[in-house]
Structure formats: C-alpha cells, structure tokens
Image (spheres, rainbow, N blue to C red):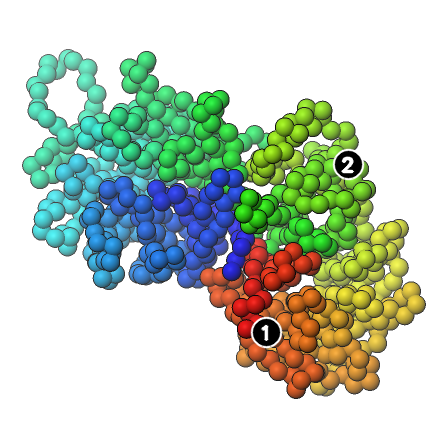
Amino acid sequence: MTCYTACSCNRVPHCADWGINGLLCFGTRNAIAIYEPRANIGHVTHTLHRHRDYVNTVHWIKPGNGAPESELLSGSVDGTVIIWSKDRSTFQCTSVLNVEGTVAFADSLQMADNIPSTTLAKLLICTGSVCGNVKLWLREENADVKQIQSIIFGRKLPIYCRLTYLPNKCPLLAVALEDASILLYAKFDVESGLEQSFVNIQRLVGHEDWVMCMDFIQNSDGNLFLATGSKDNMIRLWKISEKISVEESSSDELRQESNTFVINDRQYDITLESVLCGHESWIYGLHWQPMKTDSQTMKLLSSSMDKTMIIWEPTEIMDGMWTETVRVGEVGGNSLGFYGCKFGPDGLYILAHGYQGTFHIWKYSQEINKWLPHPAPGGHFAEVVDLCWEPKGRFLITASVDQTTRIHAPWKDDDLEELWHEIARPQIHGYNMTCLTMLSPHIYVSGADEKVVRIFMATSTFRDKLKLLANIDDFKFVKAHSAAVPSLGLTNKATYGGHKDENTKNSTMENSYEPPTEEELMQNTLWPETNKLYGHGYEIFCMAAKHDGQLLATACKSTTQEHSAILLWDTNTWSQVQQLSYHQLTVTQMEFSPDDKYLLSVSRDRRWSLFKAINTSYELIAASSKKDNPHSRIIWCCAWTQDSNYFATGSRDGKIAIWSTKTIENNIVPKIILDMKNRSVTALCFAPRYVTRDFYLLAIGYEAGHIEIQRINIELDSVWSKLLEYDTFQAHHLTVKRLMFRPTNHSYNNLQLASCSNDHSVKIHNIELSSLLS
C-alpha cells in the first residue's frame, strides 16, 4: 500500500479541478492524481495511469443537480481523452476517445440529472486539438462513445471551449478563437435527438488578445453569465437573458448595445455586464463559486500570471457594480505566476496552481475575517533522480532535475498514523541535480550538472521544525540559524541570530502542528553550503558515502578511463585521499558494503568492480571478466545484502546477477542469474537484516515503472519467488531511478520502501511482512 505520494501538477492551464465531492484531481506527467484534503495534511489516494504522454486537461464531470461527482475526464498530448468512472473505492477507465492530434482542451455536459447509480449518464463532450477543429462526442449509457459533429473554423485556431445549458435546457457551446472573439453555438431542436448539429448563433467581440479561460453560471433569476479572461489582462462578464417584450424607445435615448438571437421561438439578449480590470498580466483561470442557495451572492475567482488571485463580487453600496473584494498571492520567489484557480466545494477555500507545479491554497478564517495560506499537496515538477534516507530514517531527502532538493518527513496524528509531507527545501540550485547522499543526520552532499560537489549543513530553524516530529538529540553541531542566496550568487550563505518574536510564536503553537506552506518552503528552509569539492573534469553523476560518514566517493560523466576514476574524499578535512581507476565509461552507481570493507561500482562499460579496504586505502580485488559477463548492456544499478556477503548487479538487458564476496577473489562467477526477459532493470535494494533471517528480500525497479519484491534463498539451491508486484497505478509509470528501504525499524511488522522516478513522483510504500511472507 502506498502511504505517501509527492507529485506536482503539470505546468499547463486547466490541469486541476476541485470537485463538490471534496477531492482534488490534477494531471501529473502522464497520470492523474486524486488528492484528498484533510484538516492539515492531506494525501494522494489514487494515481490513474493510462495515457502515454503528458496530461493536458483534467476536470470532474459535474452532474446537473449539484450532486457529488463520480466521474472525471482527462485529455493528453497522446491524442486521447479518457473518462474515468468511480468503481467502489477506485476509478476505472470506462471510455477512450481517439481525438486526432494533441488534445488542447476538453469539456463535458451531463444530459440527464437523476440517473440510477448502476448506469452511466448520457454525456455530451467537446474536445479541441492542435489540428484546429472542435469535435463533439456523445457518450451513451452503456459507455459507447461516438463522434456526432466536427466544427472547423477556417484558418483560425480554437483556444478553449465550454459547454452549458441555456435556461430552456438547450445545450450551448462557447468557443474562443485566436482572433480574440468568442463564438456561441446552440442546438435548435433538442427533442429531435442529439444527432442534429450545433449552429453558430452569435459572435462576441471586445477582447484584444486571446481568450484563455471561460466559465458559465446561472443565477437565481434564471440569467446565464459568461466570464471570459484574456491575455489583454481583462475579464469581461456577459449576461445572457430571455427577452420579455420588445419596447420601442425613442431613438435618442442611450441604451447598452445588445445582441439578440432566437432559439425555439424564445428570444435571448446578450449584453456586456461588466469589464473587470485589476490584474497586471495574462489571465489564465476563472471560476464561479458554486451556487448552493438562491440568496447567495455571485462570486468570481480569477488567477493571473502576475502571481495574484482576485475574488470579484457585485457590491450593493455601488448599485451592483462588480468590484475586487479579496486579493491573495505570493511575493518574491522565482516562480512565474498562476495557471488556474478553483473555489473549494464550500467556498471557504481557494486554490491556485502555478508554473512550478505547486499548489497554493488559502483558507477563509472567520475569527479574523481574513484569507490565510493553507498547506497544499506538492512535489518535484521534473524527473526525480535520487533519494536518500537520513541514517535513522527520520526523514527522506530527494533530488530532482527541477534543480531542488526536498526533505519529506512524517507527522504522527492522534491515531499514530504517519502523515508524510514536505518540510524543507534545503537547496534551490541553478543546475539540474543528479545525485545526493547523507553523511550524518545534519549534513548531506549533492552533485548537479556541474563539476563541483557541494556540502550542506542543517540550520537551527530546520532542527526546531524536526523537533515537533522526531527525537533530535544527535543534532549537536548546528550553528547557522538559516540560509539565503545572495542576489548574484549560486551559494547558500549562512545567516546567524534568530529573531526573538519567532521563538515566542513557536512556544504558543506547540500543541498544534502546522505543516509549512509553499511560501515558507520556497523562502525560509534553505540550508547553508559549507564546502565545495573540486577535482572532476565533467559533470558529477553519482556518489556514495561510508556508513559512518567518514569517507565520500564521487564519480562524473566520462568517455575515457582517466575521467572515469572514482575520487575518495576524507570528510573531516575535505581533502582528496585516493583515486580509484578501472572503468572506461561513466560509473552509474557506487555502494559501500554495510560493514564498509568493500566499495562496489558499476558502469556504462557493462562491468562492475570491487575494491577492498586494506589498511587505510581501497584496492581493486575483483572485476567482471569480459568473457563470462552475464550483462550484455549497461549495468544501471547495484545493491548489497545487509550482512555484506553478497551483492547484486542489474542491467538494461533485464538480467540480475548475485555474486558472493567470499569466493569472488578466486572465481568470478555469479551465484545466481535472474533473467527478467528484456525488462530493463534500473534500481535494486535489499531489505534490512532484521526482517530476513535465512533468506533475502530484493526490491527491483524497472524502466517501465513497475516495482517487484523477490524472495531469494541463495544457499538453498538458489530459489527465487516473486512475493509482490506494484503496477503503474501503485508504483510509477516511467523509469524507477532509485529504491531504498527505510533504515531503522519504525514498526516491527512493516517495511517501508521509498522510490523515485522519471514520472516526477516520490512514493513511500508500506509493505506488511506478515501477509507478504505467508
């Protein structure tokens, strides 16, 4: 079971939605995550994977009667739109629409309100792709989908579309085009079945740049409102109302210009209700607050690239004029702005998702009548390349191509359930991260796409945060209060001396734990950099540390034997003590044995090498021979058993070999070879010792994203048996980069396995030993 998933929202508009059912759904790489908010730390409950490329648009399919949603719709760059339907506690893919070209936007309209729970509702779906046409589809009760119409706009591209009902239950389609106009389409005769096509009835002009977002709402008087937000930084509100009678008025009287159209003998007026200007940059998101009661005032939420969100509502004092009532946003940081916004189901929360895949949630506090930042889901927004547990397993640190390292830790609630969340972001760099390792609970080392290895030390701010979550008696040497990056620098500089008011604030809040918000993580949780190590000729690729933290091994990208050398550093003096040369190409992974006697390295040259500590230095004692090498492709990964008697190597050709250190010096032959039938193996890890007395548990990560757990009896005629497999819903849907079991025994009958992947996510899996081994 997955107890923690850290992932971020794809960096496109319309990629997140918050339903009346209280759940938040968002696209994360090629999958859709379902997040359940809780009082202070929510969690991702499902990851739905079927698309083969980035997910571009996700939304809940709204029933007309305001009931909680049970279906969602997702569209992807791979040209498909999928409808997911709730099936007891999970979501199943019920229909797939093959749209030609990248799906840019999609919307849906439920045709019937009160449907029995056994059948699906009739659904009208519109999809738009980069091919430049808008297609309309009909989903029947038996989940069959057929295309009923395709609308072509000549040489103009559609940017976005929305579906709704006119007051007389006639479907209305609004399409925004690249000439900044909005076309309205309607079906004239609803009774004659849905085969009859939509007809263009009106063109709305006024915006001066592309319309990026639209939203409809029907108010208590039966009028339909359309809000449109554009790249000209303006929002326009259009009112569509039924015309009662035609009054002839004198020609010199000033009247608002109105457009009329007739459907089924009813005449409708479209007037421009208001133009809202308050944003200073492109508007990407609009959302009307869901109407629960008739007496409720209308509220419109808008988000923009200027890093702000605004709530607009008509004020009675100013005769119903629309004004800005609330403005929230973020100041500083290096993010771009907001891509979308949503009201929470009860209207007390507002959410925005931004350029760095982050969510920002504000909660309305009735006591002080203000909107306050609230913890939100988060994670890396690019490939996660490495992870490492703190030596006692109190927290997990991860590194990613998004140029950050992040620390995740659990908070135990009253039921002693572990609620994992991000507590710090110690490094925000200018280069893509490639690897990291912990030397001690408060020092870690990281490498990025540069020739320098950097060392970081924890701050007292971090120690105080961790104190609320775990025992921190061994954090003795923390000096700096916090860290900051100078305006033109790349180095985190330590700052000393905390402010008095913060200490008083912490003492009053000790009884209730508040996880850090996105703003705090971006600005206040850096660790200072204490040293840099120079010596490699190319970008750092991998590293490993002895278990006592006294020795660090680093390696860099290389195509020659000279640069493929492994450098060993003394962590007390930070001087280079040895250079181990054997490999011809980049070393892909290194591991010190648990007793620190051996150093194992594997490389792109399809070989492994084993170095043994003799006196004070390491010497090569064994390496794979060219002749009988079981690996015919790159060896990606290696792992040690906890007793240091065996090590495993895994390669791209799908073979895992296990070697014994006792016989290796005389006879280089693997004890066992497991062939995974061309499934490329990219990560390996053995379970800790206390679990396995007479056998070993090996976790295997694959290029396809699956994770397996195999049980091995090496001494007893080498028996393999697969105990468990996580598929792409439970594990990952792209390459698994690193697997690591949580070191110390936090719960006696459970193992915890952390994994990170190219699908931008970090997961922690709870593995129940009793059920696994039975």
Q: Where is residue 616 in the image (x, y as percent from the top left)?
A: 91, 65
Name the residue carrying label 2. Answer: 480
Q: What element carries label 1?
A: strand
Answer with the quarter of the image where residue 428 lies.
top right
Residue 482 located left or right of residue 117: right
Residue 322 located left or right of residue 308: left
Q: Which residue is drawn at 39% across and 58% down?
A: 90
Task: Decide if residue 213 is in sight here.
Answer: yes
51 in relation to 284, above or below: below
Depth check: give the residue in front, 233 or 363.
363
Q: Residue 248 carries which label?
A: none
> Which kind of residue does numbered mark 1 sit on?
Gln
In the image, which is nearer the foreground, mark 2 or mark 1? 1
Task: Decide if residue 586 is in sight here.
Answer: no
Q: Residue at x 54, y 53 (%)?
A: 4
Residue 445 located left or right of residue 403: right
> Which kind of residue does numbered mark 2 sit on?
Ala
Q: Which residue is drawn at 29% across and 33% down?
A: 291
Name the residue carrying label 1. Answer: 710
Depth check: give the residue in front, 146 or 271.
146
Mark 2: give few (<14), some (14-19) or many (20+) Cα within 10 Å.
some
Q: Position of residue 604 (x, y in %)?
A: 69, 70
The residue positioned farthest toward the right in the image shown: 615
Answer with the quarter of the image where residue 317 lies.
top left
Q: Is mark 2 on a helix, strand or loop?
A: loop
Label 2 to label 1, Cα distance in Å? Answer: 45 Å
Answer with the quarter of the image where residue 478 lies.
top right
Q: Earlier in the sequence, mark 2 or mark 1?
A: 2
Q: Position of residue 72 (x, y in %)?
A: 34, 51
Residue 343 located left or right of residue 621: left
